[in-house]
Each structure stands twice: as C-alpha cells, then as structure tokens.
Amino acid sequence: MNRQKENKELKRAWWKESVVYQIYPRSFMDSNGDGIGDIPGIISKLDYLKELGIDVIWLSPVYQSPNADNGYDISDYRQIMKEFGTLEDLERLIDEAHKRSIKLIMDLVVNHTSDEHPWFAEARSSRDSPFRDYYIWKDGIPGTLPNNWESHFSGSAWEYDEASGQYYLHIFSTKQPDLNWENPDVRKEVMEIARYWLDKKIDGFRMDTINFISKVPGFPSVPDAEGLVRGHDYYMNGPKVHDYLKELNREVLSHYDIMTVGETPNVTPQMALEYVGEDRGELNMVFQFEHVNVDSGKRNKWDIVPWDLKKFKSIIVKWQKDIYGKGWNSLYLSNHDQPRSVSRFGNDGVYHDESAKMLATMIHTLQGTPYIYQGEELGMTNVKFPDITYYKDIQILNLYRDMTEKGFQPEEIMRRIYYRGRDNARTPMQWNSRKNAGFSEGTPWLSVNPNYREINAEDEMRDSGSVLRYYQKLIRLRKEYKIIVYGDFKEYEAESEEVFVYERNYQGQKLLVVLNFKDKTPELENRTGRLLDEAEILISNYPAVCREEKILLRPYEARVYYWKNQEEKG
C-alpha cells in the first residue's frame, strides 16, 4: 500500500482532531477567596479557554476526597469535594462548556480508593465483611511483609491493619488501598460509576494508572533484590488487564460517543497497541512515559541524569512510526505529575519565550492528540521555594523525610525537588500581575510562583508575540490543515545532538518541521526534495527570514514549512 492511499484510509474521529486542555482544579481559579481553586472558578474562565481554541477539557479529580493525594484518593465517586463546589456546579460546568462547543472528560481513578471510602471502612471492619474482597489482603505478622514491593510514595506497598491482623496492598499512599479487580462486584461498581458520569453528559475519561488494575497471582517478590523495590513486572500490564478493559468497553464505554485515554507507565508501542489498536475494543489512546523518563536513572524519577536529545528523539520517532495507522498517540510534555516543560526541555531564562514556543510547535505538529497542561500556554516555569515547608505534595514530603533519614543534605534533596517535584506543576495559574497572580483573593493553598509579574495570561493576551498567542495560532493551524492531524511521519537529522527535523505527508501535501533544541545556530541541508522558496512558512517563533537553500537556525528556533498538493498548484 502506498503512502498516499494509507493516509486516505485513516479513520476520522473528533478526538483525533481535538486539542485537550488539562485543568488541575485546586490551582486553576478560586472564586470564593478560600485559596483553593473551584468549579465556579473554572466556569468563569471558559471564555478564556474558548478564545485559546481548545476543544476538550480534561478535569483532574473533583470527587469527594480527604486529599491525601490531592483528590486521587476518592472517598465518594458520586459526590463533589466541598472545597470545589457542588454537584450542581459540576453539572453547570458541563452545560456551560458544551454551550461553547467545549467537551469535558473526567478522571476515572479506579485502581484504588481512599481508605476513607465506605467500601474500605466496611472491608477492614471484619474479615467476614462482604466488602473484604473489594481489596487485596494478605496474612502476616507485623514487621514481616508479604513481599518486597515498594510503594510509589516510598516505603512498603503493604500496610498492616491491626484490627483485622492482615496486610493490605497500596501501590501508592497507605491511604490509597488497591481495589481487587478479580472480584466481579468491583468491576460492576466501576461500570456503574462510569455510567453515572456518562449519563450526566461528560465526554469521556482519562483513566488513572489503568494498567495497574491486574496483579500477577501470588504477588511474588522481585527476585534477587536488596530491600524494597518497585514490583512493576507484577502489577503493571498484568495478565487480565485487557480482559477487564474489554469488558468495561463492551458493557459501558462503547455505548457512548466519547474519548478515553489511559495512563499506562512502562508500555512500549507494541504493548500500547494492545490497549489502543483500533480493532481491540479497549481505549482510544494512552499516556506513555518513555519520553518523560528520559532524564531518569535506573532506580526512579529522583535518580536524575542529564537528558540526551538523540535518545529523546528516538523515543518520539518510535512512537510516531509504530503507532501510525494502527492506533492513536497522545502528545504531551507536561501534566500535574511532571515538572514544567520549558524548565525541563527548554530554557526558562534567556530564551524562555523562544524555547516555550519551540516545544509547543513539536507537540502540536506530531501525529496524535495534543494535551496542554494549564499554564503551559503561558510558558509557566518550575519554582524554587526557599525550603521544604512551602511544599504540599505527599510524594515530595515523603522523599524529603526518607532522604533526610538516609543522611542526605537538604541542598541535595532540594536540588532534586526543584528539578522534578510535582508541585512545580501545581503552583496556582498565573492570570495577571496583581495579588496572588489573580488566582485568589485569599491565601493560596500553595504559594504562587514569584515570576507571575513577568509571566501571566493578561499580559500575554495583550502581546501579539507572546507564548499564549503562539499557542492560539498552532491550534488554529491544526484545525485548518488536516495534514497536521493525519499525515504520516519521516525523520531527518536523526544523529543530530541539536535539532529535531521531521516531515509529514498527506494526500500530496508536505510539511517540514524544523526544531532547534539548543542555544546554538546550526546549519542544515534541505533534504525534502522540494524547493524551500516554493514553501509557505506556516509558523515560526522568529521573524521570517529569506528561504535559504541551507537552513540556518537561531537559538531554539522552530519553523514549519508547507507545500501544497502539486495538483492544486496548477
């Protein structure tokens, strides 16, 4: 099959042609001055999102929760956290978003619940409780763990329950016990939760750690390991995960016109196709983590190593080529669990605007659905708070405690937090240069990044050359040029340590994307087979220059060349 014919046969879908904007409600907009973002605050900013041009809001959890992990520990899936508002507020958000032709997807967090969920309260009340089997329990005595798995939030993944004399499994916090998906009643409960929200006219789900839901029987220890270690091979992509997702899709999801994206750490493209293959009947796309683990050492994310552009590109290219025509990619650099992309992959100093725009160009011109994390469209950066007392994230606080106990100096611990901590992404949205960045009239739950006077939405709306205005143009181009959505992918300059260059083709049209990831000025050959002076530059983060036969790039420059279908030119 030739390339042009293959392009024409790609299945069209609204979620493939959409741009998604993630809202972390606690940090987006506070409407009542209590320092915590809320649903009415989100409603007040829908016109901003409409002007930005996005199509879908992904709303991080707003369900009732004791907030051990900022809402990812749910105690009631059908009620709204009081700090965020009411169920009526959420219904109004859905309605107001739809009036603006903006869809809304919600987080489905069903690998675990809060330990304050009624199911778990009943489960731990007695070994004979009908809810006991909703969770995963193992016999043992205090101090003798069922296996050597380490929690993602440090310490053992098992917690001893004095009242019932057994351990329960928690891959994350002790306050987030894992559900037992082997129990058909648990799966029925999940289906009912999904149906409840879909009947309220939401447009889909982002599924939290969805590839954790099936564990290897017997819960074996990781062999030949000293101390506690991550047991990824035993609870990620487990033996029944596809059976469970097919069942969920067959019984519920397939009955609605929705989008689904699964959070799936530790998947390869081949593994991902088992989740998102268009003939699989499971999910539409997944969030893979390979590219955002490019600076992680062998142990975990806090084992930080310098990231390498060649390796980064090779990961992106692999996912572009291996998924194309068989499934669908999700495209992102930032979210609530990742540091700010301009601080990590760009330059948040001298070349802040240029590198923020360059990174945006990449995300919005690759094949897949782009995701913007709140504030990314402004070029919001990582924050360096003075000391650990400013931080709120359970993962950061556990890290600081554990590393302190092991004898690390505060400066070394803070270096890792400044680079990789999740609170980098959770500082309040920077709306303007006034008090608390316009986020709240009260004291924000997490301090505002001090650079809000230089980086904020109000100022960027006034500036035609701002990062925000650049995002608007990228989103418009994606809607105008289907080649950006459905075109295939070919890389040039694969060995370069400075540039990422790729071509997209669709129905005779050609797109060439040239991205400089360094503060140098590399010169490139034109290898496209078409003359540069015949191309239109769709977008660039520098003023246009004459179309030289060799492409000379400025620091962190991005250019997108476009050639029309040759038949159209005549």
Image (cartoon, rainbow, N blue to C red):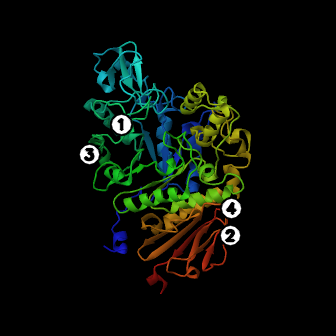
Q: Which residue is mark 4?
A: 465
User: Which one is earlier in the sequence, the residue at label 4 or at label 3?
Assistant: 3
Q: Quadrant of residue 131?
A: top left
The spot of residue 112 in percent (x, y) is: 39, 31
Q: Please name the residue shown 27% across and 40% down the image.
A: 240
- The numbered dot on residue 327 is none
Q: Is residue 29 visible from the viewing direction of this image? A: no
Q: Please name the residue shown 32% across and 14% down the image.
A: 126
Q: Which residue is mark 1?
A: 235
Q: Is residue 570 above or below residue 480?
A: below
Q: Which circle, 1 or 2, is nearer the viewer?
A: 1
Q: Is residue 507 above or below residue 88?
A: below
Q: CA distance from mark 3 to mark 2?
A: 51 Å
User: Which one is earlier in the sequence, the residue at label 1 or at label 3?
Assistant: 1
Q: Is residue 210 left or right of residue 379?
A: left
Instruction: Give the secondary structure at mark 2.
Output: loop
Residue type beneath disc 3: Arg
Q: Please name the residue shown 37% across and 74% down the image.
A: 4
Pick the residue in front: 232 or 514. 232
Residue type beneath disc 4: Gly
Q: CA distance from mark 1 to mark 2?
A: 50 Å
Instruction: Give the secondary structure at mark 4.
Output: loop
The spot of residue 312 in percent (x, y) is: 51, 56
Q: Is residue 546 left or right of residue 288?
A: right
- The numbered dot on residue 250 is 3
The local crowd at label 2, few if under 14, some if 14 to 19, many if 20 or more residues have their Cα within 10 Å, is few
Instruction: Give the secondary structure at mark 3.
Output: helix
The spot of residue 107 in percent (x, y) is: 44, 40
